[in-house]
Amino acid sequence: MKQKHADNSYGPAEAAALRMVQGDLPDCAEPYAEIARQAGLTEAEALDLLQRLKDQGVIRRFGATLRHQQAGYGDNAMVAWYVEQDLDLDQVGALMASRPEISHCYQRRNCYEWPFNLYTMVHARSRQECLDLVEELSKVSRVPQYAILFSRIELKKTSMAYF
């Protein structure tokens, strides 16, 4: 039975390879060759599948997931920013997203009771470092209105699984 996604049909071996790349890649010198071997494909077939999906925009990127608390970044916060209409929200978002301490940066629709329209996830080694970074970002972006929501307990951290 073939599964469909985007404009492709995938056989069982391709679907198996896609399931594997959604999780942790094998810890070896040639992870794509190992995925291909386990899925019943050649390495070239597996790489071709991934490249086709990337070219179609189905896959945007591969990236490592950093367990920030285990890496010494024990304090993090969601910061909700109110970017006023006279500022370029895309430019402010790009500025914030360029910072290595920020892992997520999203624009969202605001509402009367909650005016914030830009959200960032800020990671720091201490609460004070996080507060200092937010204050610095506020100054350089010219966005003075924000709310800091510090994380208390991480309940879930996983990637989406599509296959």
Image (tube, grey):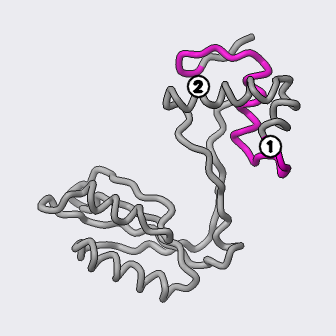
Q: Nearer the viewer, residue 11 or 145?
A: 11
Residue 19 on the magenta segment: yes
Residue drawn at the location 76% of the way across and 37% of the way down: 20
> For residue 31, which numbered disc appears in the image?
1
Q: Residue furthest left?
A: 86
Label 2: state its secondary structure: helix
What residue is pinned by disc 2?
Answer: 52
**6 with respect to 162 (left or right):** left
Q: Position of residue 60 (x, y in %)?
A: 52, 39
Vertical relation: 31 (above or below) 113: above
Residue drawn at the location 57% of the way across and 74% of the way down: 152
Residue 158 on the magenta segment: no
Q: Position of residue 28 (x, y in %)?
A: 85, 50
Residue drawn at the location 38% of the way across and 61% of the way down: 119
Disc 2 marks which amino acid? Arg
Residue drawn at the location 23% of the way across and 63% of the way down: 83
Quick one: label 1, few (<14), some, or many (20+) residues within 10 Å? some
Quick one: label 2, few (<14), some, or many (20+) residues within 10 Å? few
Vertical relation: 60 (above or below) 69: above
